[in-house]
Amino acid sequence: MTFSEQVEIMREGGTILTSVLKILKEKIEPGVKASELDALAEKLILEAGAKPAFKNYHPNFCKEPYPYSLCVSINEIVVHGLSSENLIIKDGDIVSLDLGVKFKNYFTDAAITVGAGKISKENKKLILATRKALENAIKITAAGNTFGDIGWEVESTIMDYGFKPIRDLCGHDIGEFLHGNLQVLNFGDPGTGNKIKGGMIFTIEPMASISSQFSLQCNPSQCPFRTEDNSVSAHFEATLAIFEDKTLVLTPVLGI
């Protein structure tokens, strides 16, 4: 299979993923259970002819596989929130939805953060900053530039808004596997790091918080990470494919 053919399959999977996130976004309101969002995500993915990528995925930093199709992470939980029956969205929460899809044996990954009910001005600004960081990073992601360029765009954008980028969680390569070894960091210096090359597919996923640069695993047997100081966080993510002459966004979540 050529790179272009692989990208086309992943673009189809990304279209499914984005459409599901768009529906889930509209369901975010006080009183909604994370388990309801998880069940809806799985239902929509299966109906579209794809499979949930996260369900029963076992990352090496967890003792147990992740048991849900959708990661619902609220407030200080940065990523990998457990979408349980007991997790209920409250007024003023900011809610990150992280979703992966497997379509024709290829994976795509994306995340958005939205507010529930009436959120504070500071939290609204945090969501905007994190979203803008992804937008700015996508603009400069091209063959010939460096991963330090991406990290700088993410870091500088978030800090310009007065917030902190999460430095110990990052984007990753993706395709026939969900997570590879490539680290797409949320900090860096222009012109440093490895070159971005045609044929690469990876995610950029800015994560930011009010006041913490680092995260902690909530429980060593489970997957969620929270901010080190329990301050509120936000998370956006998109999957990108790099050609020598262009960059394609396979999960265009900024437009939903």
Image: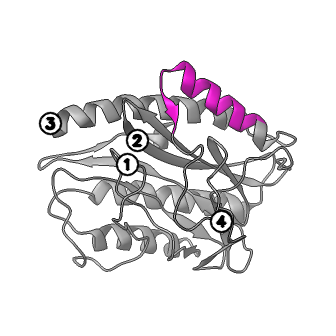
Residue at 24%, 79% (x, y): give it: 192
Cβ atoms at labels 4 and 3 below 8 Å apart: no
Q: How far apart are marks 4 and 3 (CA)?
A: 39 Å
Q: How far apart are marks 3 and 2 (CA)?
A: 16 Å
Q: Where is residue 216 in the image (x, y as percent from the top left)?
A: 65, 76
Q: Distance between the residues labelled 1 and 3?
A: 17 Å
Q: Where is residue 190 in the image (x, y as percent from the top left)?
A: 27, 77
Of the residues tagged 4 and 1, which is closer to the observer?
A: 1
Q: Is residue 209 above or below residue 30?
A: below
**Residue to which mark 3 is pinned:** 2
**Callout 3: helix, strand or loop?**
loop
Nearer the N terminus, badge 1 or badge 3?
Answer: 3
Of the residues tagged 1 and 3, which is closer to the observer?
A: 1
- Amino acid under disc 3: Thr
**Callout 1: helix, strand or loop?**
loop
Q: Is the magenta stretch mostly helix, strand or loop?
A: helix
Quadrant of residue 125 in the image? Answer: bottom right
Q: In this view, does 184 lie above or below 251?
A: below
**Callout 4: helix, strand or loop?**
strand
**Residue to which mark 4 is pinned:** 233
Nearer the N terminus, badge 2 or badge 1?
Answer: 2
**Callout 2: helix, strand or loop?**
strand
Residue at 35%, 65% (x, y): give it: 181
Of the residues tagged 2 and 4, which is closer to the observer?
A: 2
Nearer the N terminus, badge 3 or badge 2?
Answer: 3
Cβ atoms at labels 2 and 1 below 8 Å apart: yes
Q: On the rendered structure, is 98 left or right of 6?
A: right
- Amino acid under disc 2: Phe
